[in-house]
Image: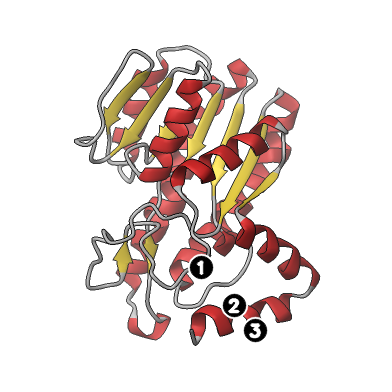
Amino acid sequence: MISGGAGGLGRALSDALQARGWHVTLLDRDISTIEPGETQRVIQCDLTDPGQLAAACTAAVGGRGVDLVIYNAGITQIGLFADSDEASHRRVFEINYFAAVNMARVMIDPVRQARGTHLAISSVAGFAPLYSRTSYAASKHALEGFFKSLRSEERAHGVAVQIAAPSFVATNLGNPQAQPDGIARPGSATDGMDYMTPEAAAATILRGLDRGRDMIPVGRVARLAWWINRLSPGLYQRLMESKIGRG
């Protein structure tokens, strides 16, 4: 099951899994651009509505076990914190964090039944700072904290919890659908570097999934950011500011 399945990375993950022989269910608010198929089920759902989300997951599962849940849905917000408001900050959290948590709550038993895997799609901004993305980085830090903690709880049930952290994936370049409060579609930022295609990102994520890696940095920038931030957070912050904060 993949939340945000109509987006570029969600669709790439779905295609790659189906090529391996998996059956997938995609959840998204707008499913007009994707078609169901023999191995792909599509369910329309507002992921920020807990009732809708629970009903969609329950209908999709039908009492069966689920081998893999990918928490992929997300939005970004680009702009300085001083220019933002509380409502937009909460909106980012509703989609990036609370929708994933509510979905995990519904999927706990089906994943345990299959001794399956929860796979959260985070970001470099989930473990490191990112200029002009305060709400986005905060939501991804929260997402990682939740799933890292869930990992310890679910291990006793034979369940794996993994996190993938892409850098810049070109899913919506030229189609940001930006709103006045800075909220935009993920993968639409123009100040990134070393962009990956959704297909390349999906392939890296699934390799990490196969290898059972707890943390999967996705892309060259993500791998460098992971190590530099761990070894010298101050150096990382200066490099990030020089590349993004001041161009």
Q: Amino acid at mark 1?
A: Met
Callout 3–callout 2 Cβ contact below 8 Å: yes
Q: Which residue sits furthest right?
A: 231
Q: Which mark is residue 193?
A: 1
Callout 1–callout 3 Cβ contact below 8 Å: no
Q: Nearer the viewer, mark 2 or mark 1?
A: 1
Secondary structure at badge 3 equals helix
| Residue sitting at x 64%, y 40% | 162
User: What is the x, y in percent for residue 69?
Assistant: 51, 31
Whether residue 1 is visible to the viewer of this picture, yes or no, is no
Secondary structure at badge 1 equals loop
Which quadrant of the structure image shows residue 52? top left
| Residue sitting at x 42%, y 23% | 24
> What residue would you read off at disc 3?
238
- Mark nearer the N terminus (1 vs 3): 1
Q: Which mark is residue 212?
A: none
- Picture mark count: 3
